[in-house]
Amino acid sequence: MAIRFEGNIFHLTTDHTLYQMGLDAFGVLYHLWYGEKTECSMCYLYHYPDVGFSGNPYEAGKLRTYSMDTLPLEYATEGNGDYRIPAAAVVNSDGSCALDLRYESYEIREGKYEIPGLPAVYADEAQAQTLEIHMRDAVSGLAVTLKYGVLEADDVITRSVVFENRGEQPIRLTRAHSMCLALPDGAWDWMHFHGRHTMERQMERRELFHGIQQIGSTRGTSSHQQNPAVILCERDCTETSGCCIGAALMYSGGFQAQIEVDQMEQVRMVLGIDPETFSWTLAQGECFYTPEVILSCSTQGLTKLSQQFHSVIRNHVCRGSYQLSARPVLINNWEATYFDFDEEKILSIAKQASELGIDLMVLDDGWFGKRDNDCSGLGDWTVNEQKLKGGLGALIEKVNALGMRFGLWFEPEMVSEDSDLYRAHPDWALRIPGRNPVRSRYQLVLDLSREDVRAYLYESISRLLRENHIEYVKWDMNRSICDWYSAFLPTERQSELPHRYILGLYELLERLTTEFPDVLFEGCSGGGGRFDAGMLYYCPQIWCSDDTDAHERTFIQYGTSFFYPVSTVGSHVSAVPNHQTGRITSLETRGTVAMAGSFGYELDLNLLSEEEKHTVSEQVKHYRQMQMLIHDGRYFRLSDPCKDEMAAWSFVSEDQSQVLVQGVIYRACPNTLRCRLRLRGLNAQAHYRIAGEKQVYSGSALMAGGILLPRAAGDDVSFELYLELVKKA
Ligand code: DGJ
């Protein structure tokens, strides 16, 4: 049994971890432990001195060691004498802000709970159990259910919260986080992933300090600037040892993660919807569901933690026909043409691509409405016949006749002021009455909380998918959101709009992905501005970054790898000098880096030399051979690109018989020994041969001594080694 309740203690066990909570005589629920599996009740770790100055609940009487302000509360709330960061806060109908949750009952069920209207980890009854703990504020009647999904074999615990107003008066939620977690001491680091457009998910690791540290997004998207995923790790935790806990929010809107080290040196972490752009009124009988957090813990370092996230996201988050199957190698015309193309140009790229073995031609921005630059056309999802004279159907037929599949770009959530849609429905855009809207990339955002807007988008996109042989959709979204005002919502509900927008987005995506299960949906938001587990529920891959420079990409893909599986990372070979950085890297290096993802090209192949074309066709063949090892194998980070002079990573098959080692040496160094790279995850007792070499190495030698890398002649030179188990004669 993954979940049991014994002696007022909840034990949630996975194969290697224990999550433990305890109940006291006052009905207060504490967090006791999340970490290595033990058989013990961990309450002995919490032993409080006289905390009279912190305030004591009334019913504790003279018990001055008992304070909400110091207890490791499982789900902390505002206004009950706990002055630390709360997970939930309310405004009651009398204007007071108190919320005091006490235990009522619990339920344990087989299988994994679902969340109405929101993406959630899915698992069958053999794979997961659900715990629901029912709490209630006796005065307001607000009932709060803490939900836990335990995926034993995956070492994963999911969390989500349901608020239900069982009182008679309305209650306004001003903060409704998805989780709260306590650690008994503050000697930990935290890691998060910051960035900007064209430089997403740069890993940063810092020691926790006293007080509150926080990341988040108020942009209406999970954002380029911060990713909604955080790691807490012991100070000496490395890739291979030490305890670390990861938390990834399955949500694509604004979010907040806060970590506080309190006066007792204890840690509290909360994670959920951004409270600055959120409040939600619950009328009598109404419910509010928070998004889900995926939690995982490793006591063997960061690589193991990442592998656990990769496995749960690939197997229990991503869906559809492409979830586990080979992805097509694609060619995208964006960096080849930008807006400047016609049918002939697209076909010339497609023809060359088909000759080189590429599977799918993706037509990017500019094929619709009056869209010759980024000032106009968004919202008018009808083909631009000036560019594509015979229409979309004719182009697709010609692409298909080349033996290639066809994919199309959309940016459904946006509208240009210079568009027929905006002229017909100006109130469909988010705008605050009497104020000029903030334009970004000259565009405004459609109000996806509105049913009529979603119906229009569903009709426009589904008609195109029904009437044309489109096998891939790139779902782009190119701005942060502000001007939060919906012509559709009453004044007192305007603050619900950012979350209603995301609910609308998910509803639309659910409808389309259900109706077109065989279409591969790739997410995108100015590159990787919405790279989160929420989007991955609908789109099994996401364009990782608009920065296609192979050197920069090694840093972006390194940061991305802490939570997200390689199969989710859209990654292309583009032209040199690189359009974002001007850097020149070899075609080999660009190929190696892009192959550590869902692979493709984004350049005019006609401009390549014959030798380069040959390299491309060899890369495509090679990727096809390696793709399942890359996507299904265990991923190992073998270097820290910020500290080492190289980026190196490997993929090891489940049975440890195949190993692909790839990387980029940043700087050539004269007159030195060859670089040594220690491998990981091999069978120590087995023997391996490197393809093309005669010598046999033991797994233990390759992990302890390492392999010798080829000498780099030049900067940013890639390497790749394929190792296979030597079969016993
Ligand atoms: C941003 C995307 O990240 C690019 O790949 C491209 O699709 C452009 N938008 C098109 O406007």
Image (spheres, rainbow, N blue to C red):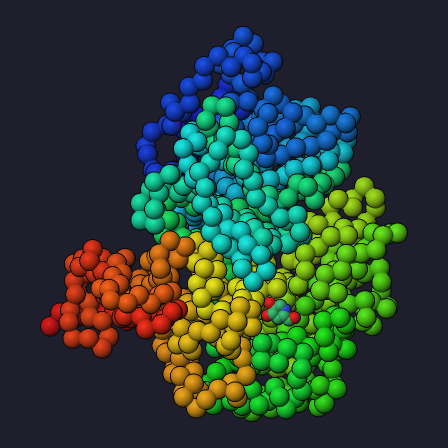
Residue 319 against residue 520 in the figure, above or below? above
Instruction: Give the position of the N terminus as an image quadrant.
Output: top left
Q: Position of residue 528 (x, y in %)?
A: 56, 61
Which of the 4 image quadrants contains residue 388?
Answer: bottom right
Furthest-front residue in view? 671
Viewed as shown, does residue 481 lie left or right of 432? left
Viewed as shown, does residue 479 lie left or right of 662? right
Q: Residue visible at 48% across and 12% down?
A: 50
Q: Position of residue 650 (x, y in %)?
A: 33, 63
Which of the 4 image quadrants contains residue 654?
Answer: bottom left
Viewed as shown, does residue 666 lie left or right of 538? left
Q: Residue visible at 55% across and 54% down?
A: 195
Q: Position of residue 280 (x, y in %)?
A: 72, 41
Residue 33 against residue 656 in the figure, above or below? above
Q: Position of residue 128 (x, y in %)?
A: 44, 48
| Front one among 276 and 610 | 610
Looking at the image, can residue 10 be seen?
A: no
Q: Residue visible at 24% across and 66% down?
A: 671
Q: Residue visible at 59% across and 46% down?
A: 216
**Total numbered circles:** 0
Furthest-top residue in view? 62
Looking at the image, can residue 298 be seen?
A: yes
